[in-house]
Image (spheres, helix red, strand yellow):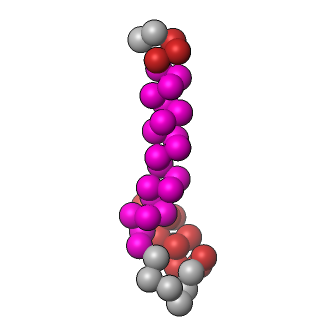
Amino acid sequence: TVLAADIAVRLIAPGRDLKLGVLTALVGAPFFLHLILKTRREGL
């Protein structure tokens, strides 16, 4: 998945120095928050 994210970064902004970590954070942070909220709602 990291390879796919790296390719996506290079395709989205080929001339800009957009770091892979930025894209990973933008995708991963909302997913991580969703998991936390889901776990809290279930009471686990």
Position of 32 relative to 1 (above/below): above
Residue found farthest to the bottom: 15
**Camera-side residue: 3 or 39?**
39
**Camera-side residue: 6 or 23?**
23
Residue at 48%, 63% in the rendered image: 23
What secondary structure characterizes most of the magenta part? helix
Segment colored magenta = 19-39
Q: Is residue 32 magenta?
A: yes
Q: Is residue 41 visible?
A: yes
- Measuring from the top left, give residue 28's x and y in whole percent: 47, 49
- Measuring from the top left, give residue 30's x and y in whole percent: 52, 43
Residue at 53%, 23% in the rendered image: 38
Position of 40 relative to 20 (above/below): above
Residue at 52%, 79% in the rendered image: 10
Q: Quadrant of the C terminus?
A: top left
Residue found farthest to the right: 12
- Measuring from the top left, give residue 15's x and y in whole percent: 53, 90
Q: Is residue 3 visible?
A: no
Position of 36 relative to 16 (above/below): above
Residue found farthest to the top: 43
Instruction: Report the label total.
Output: 0
**Camera-side residue: 9 or 22?**
22
Q: Is residue 41 magenta?
A: no
